[in-house]
Every structure is written in C-alpha cells, then in structure tokens.
Amino acid sequence: MKPSKTLPLFAYDQSLQSTYGEMVAGVDEVGRGPLAGPVVCCAVIMPLNEMIEGIFDSKKVTEKKREELAEKIKQTALSYHVAFVNEKVIDEQNILNATKHCMEQAIMGLSVKPNVVVVDAVKGLKVPYTCHSIIKGDATSYNVAAASIVAKVERDHYMQTLAQIYPAYGFDKNKGYGTKEHMQALREIGASPVHRTSFLGFLQNGKS
C-alpha cells in the first residue's frame, strides 16, 4: 500500500486548529501564466474530522481525478467560493495585483468566517482575517490543495467554453498557455478579445 500523500497535508491543517481555531481556510489561484483568459481563485474551508484521500497539489493530480475530487470537495466543504478576474483587469493591474484581488474576492465570498487563511505564496492580502502565507502551499496544506483542485477544474471548464467561441487558438487543449500551436495562431491571426495584451509583447517585436 502506497503511503498517503494527503495525510501530511491534513495533519498540517489540523495542527493549525490548536493555534488559530477550528475554521482553517485555504486559498489558491490558477492561471497566472497563460496568455489568455482569467486568473481563477478558490477559497475553501474543509472539515478536518474526516480526510478525503487524494487531495494534493492540483498539478500532480490527473484530470479525471481532479474532476472527481472537485465534486467531493464542493459537496463536503463547510464553505467554498470561486472568483474570476478577467484579462482586462490583469492588463490594467498586472498579474500579481490581479491575483491578490482575485484571492481577496474568493476569501470574502466564504459564507463561514475563517479563523485563519492559509495562502499559497502570496502575501499582503487585504482581508479582515489572519493570513498565513506558505511556499508550495498546495503541497503542504490540505485546504490549499483542495482550493487548487477546484480552481483548476473551474478554470479548465471556462477555457473549454472559450474554445467554442474562439476555436482557432485551441483553448480546450492549452487552456491559454503558450503552446507551439497557440503561438502560431497568434502570429497568423492575431489576438482575440480574451488575450492578455500585456503578455503579448512578442507580437509587436517579432520575437517568440
């Protein structure tokens, strides 16, 4: 039997309860790097009396498993909220500030007040709660990992919808990231309304 990857994350969040209180929230983002589409954030408060096996960094979980886990997380969570910040705000504010804004929206959308919020790497959020920022939070905290899974699934679904509107860019496959095919489409037909213009300097200077 393989050792559980989830158990150390679960134990980490349980350890926070003795310091901060019962309601431990996790928040994470997906989509800081793509050339198109929104950044998506999820905040979630999971019950810490029963563990859902398989919750881990969303990048290390298969697409099929993420879909299954996202449904379990949403059904089990004491509270969760997903926020989207679109490409126009990203261009106006820069990606870091847009990510902070997105995380703040996700946290403030929770219907249950957290005692502490565990944040994946980002610092300086303007929320009325104690925030504990940790590096590689989605591989350390159960709640952050759960948030990363839900955010990833929600953004992937959104990009699949955009692929139907703008089929030339392959958003259903690349999710807005700069794959070879995506870059070729940009050079041939230019950007769509959902591309982040601040990320597309190579179109002006001719560099890839």
Image (cartoon, rainbow, N blue to C red):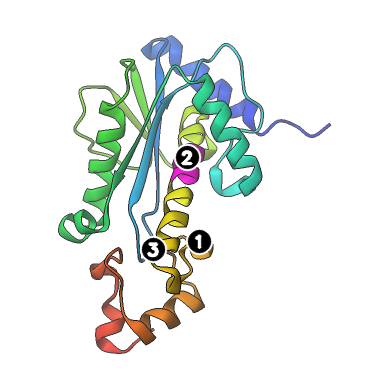
Residue 203 located within the stretch drawn in magenta: no
Residue with the mark numbered 3: 165
Image mark for residue 148: 2
Quadrant of the snapshot with the N terminus: top right
| Residue 169 higher or lower than 153, as above or below | below
Magenta range is 149-154
Asked if marks 1 and 2 touch (Cβ < 8 Å), the reply is: no
Residue 19's x, y, as percent? Answer: 40, 13
Residue 151 located within the stretch drawn in magenta: yes
Q: Nearer the viewer, mark 2 or mark 3?
A: 3
* Left or right, residue 156 beside residue 72: left
Residue with the mark numbered 1: 172
Residue 177's x, y, as percent? Answer: 44, 65
Cα separation between marks 1 and 2: 19 Å
Closer to the camera in the image, 132 or 202: 202
Q: Secondary structure at mark 1?
A: helix
Q: Quadrant of residue 37?
A: bottom left
Residue 172's x, y, as percent? Answer: 50, 61
